[in-house]
């Protein structure tokens, strides 16, 4: 199957055919190592830090924990990238109008029942007193950091894909879906790709952005600090590339809850809908739209091979997550449980940025949607970096 057929640059050139699973598929055994209980346990562990709001002790404690876990996984070069955060007034772009029709964030056209969504800022909506107390730590402007680690490619250490999620949250809950679900996915991929018997030709950087919930401060700082360093061998002749050339970015943000459109009375079904899907979005109005679309379809094809339960739906309205900061620089997509604009924006996820976004809100059908997203990205990235499991001697 040809995934792209016109000149769309480097991403197209690196795609491989993913039309069917082969018995000797080198990536399948790595995907098979993913485990629902382990994914849930990592989400649960992240919720001990409450809503992990940026600029608080609980946010720093979460970064310390993520850092320590990545070291136990053997992920190379676990580092803390420092930057400074000073809040600026930040507002989501207003609802646009095109041809007289209202458009959602990201450019989609809203349809059906719509429930207005606003992030919770009321502590009293959290009935768990211990959690409310933890989340009461105030945020302060000042120094920030975020955790990165890398799987170094065996033959192309100078090129990498970025696999990312934001680790900060808000809303006076546990930020379990937004975004422990994405952080746990990226941590699981970092663990599995770092296994001693897994080799990749290209590099993968695992990035845990901070300050997404304010102004994408962490990912913007990464671009500002690292963009010009891409592909440089340092020191010369060492074979080491501290900042490999960016080939593409896959962001994971909110992966558990696809219970469908709100009903006429504004309530949402308590059950995962059987036709739940993983929404892979690129932004049609971006410099790399065509290459990002090709990456999205590569991920969709990988989903059809590797994901056990839930399919991918591709859309062109990626918005309001860190991948938006990269979309005019490299091919960039996001994975979510709903489309950001016309679905989350219309109330499909009643726990979004709410005190109810806690681990106990979700059941195994919800967690399994997140696990399917992990299977999807692992399969897609595994193919792109040339992953193989080394045979024991
Ligand atoms: Zn988020």
Image (tube, rainbow, N blue to C red):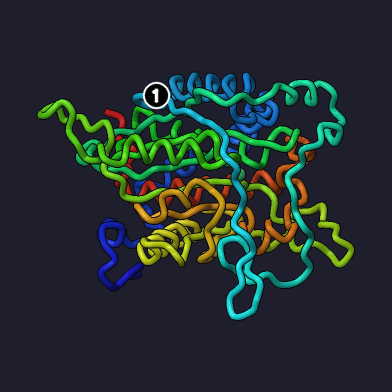
**Residue depicted at 57% across the width and 21% down the height:** 60
Q: Quadrant of the N terminus?
A: bottom left
* Position of 105 relative to 367 (above/below): below
Residue 184 shows up from this direction: no
**Residue depicted at 59% across the width and 45% down the height:** 90
Mark 1 neighbour density, 10 Å: few (under 14) some (14–19) many (20 or more): some
Asked whether mark 1 and ligand 1 are closer than 8 Å, the reply comes as no
* Position of 285 relative to 34 (above/below): below
Q: Position of residue 269 (x, y in %)?
A: 82, 57
Q: Residue furthest bottom?
A: 99
**Residue depicted at 49% across the width and 34% down the height:** 208
Q: Position of residue 350 (x, y in %)?
A: 77, 51
* Position of 64 relative to 39 (above/below): above
In the rendered view, does 227 fall on the left or right side of 51?
left
Q: Position of residue 252 (x, y in %)?
A: 53, 46
Residue 382 shows up from this direction: yes
For the residue pair 241 and 139, the one nearer the viewer reads as 139
**Quarter assignment of residue 353:** top right
Count the labels in the image.
1
Q: Position of residue 297 (x, y in %)?
A: 43, 64
In the rendered view, does 129 fall on the left or right side of 112?
right
In the rendered view, does 160 fall on the left or right side of 285?
left
Q: Residue furthest front?
A: 89
Q: Quadrant of ligand 1?
A: top right
Secondary structure beneath disc 1? strand
Q: Look at mark 1 in the image and give the residue it sits on.
A: 78
């Amino acid at each position: 199957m040809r995934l792209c057929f016109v000149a769309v640059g480097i991403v197209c050139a690196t795609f491989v055919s993913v039309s069917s699973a082969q018995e000797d598929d080198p990536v399948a055994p790595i995907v098979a190592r993913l485990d629902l209980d382990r994914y849930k346990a990592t989400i649960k562990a992240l919720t001990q830090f409450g809503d992990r709001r940026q600029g608080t002790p609980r946010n720093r404690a979460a970064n310390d924990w993520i850092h320590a876990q990545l070291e136990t996984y053997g992920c190379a070069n676990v580092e803390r990238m420092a930057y400074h955060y000073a809040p600026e007034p930040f507002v989501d772009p207003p609802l646009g109008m095109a041809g007289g029709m209202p458009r959602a964030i990201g450019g989609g056209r809203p349809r059906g029942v719509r429930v207005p969504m606003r992030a919770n800022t009321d502590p009293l909506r959290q009935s768990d007193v211990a959690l409310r107390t933890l989340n009461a730590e105030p945020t302060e402007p000042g120094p920030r950091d975020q955790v990165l680690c890398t799987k170094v490619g065996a033959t192309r250490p100078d090129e990498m894909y970025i696999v990312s999620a934001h680790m900060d949250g808000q809303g006076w809950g546990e930020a379990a879906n937004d975004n422990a679900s994405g952080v746990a996915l990226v941590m699981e991929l970092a663990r599995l790709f770092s296994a001693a018997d897994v080799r990749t030709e290209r590099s993968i950087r695992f990035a845990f952005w901070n300050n997404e919930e304010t102004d994408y401060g962490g990912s913007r700082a990464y671009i500002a600090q690292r963009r010009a360093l891409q592909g440089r061998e340092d020191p010369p002749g060492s074979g080491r590339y501290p900042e490999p050339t960016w080939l593409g970015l896959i962001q994971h943000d909110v992966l558990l809850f696809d219970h469908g459109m709100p009903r006429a009375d504004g309530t949402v079904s308590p059950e995962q809908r059987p036709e739940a899907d993983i929404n892979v979005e690129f932004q049609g109005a971006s410099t790399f739209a065509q290459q990002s679309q090709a990456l999205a379809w590569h991920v969709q094809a990988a989903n059809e091979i590797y994901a056990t339960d839930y399919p991918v739906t591709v859309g062109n309205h990626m918005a309001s997550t860190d991948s938006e900061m990269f979309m005019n620089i490299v091919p960039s997509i996001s994975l979510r449980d709903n489309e950001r604009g016309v679905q989350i924006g219309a109330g499909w996820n009643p726990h979004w940025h709410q005190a109810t976004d806690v681990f106990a809100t979700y059941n195994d059908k919800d967690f399994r949607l997140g696990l399917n997203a992990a299977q999807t990205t692992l399969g897609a990235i595994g193919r792109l970096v040339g992953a193989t499991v080394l045979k024991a001697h």
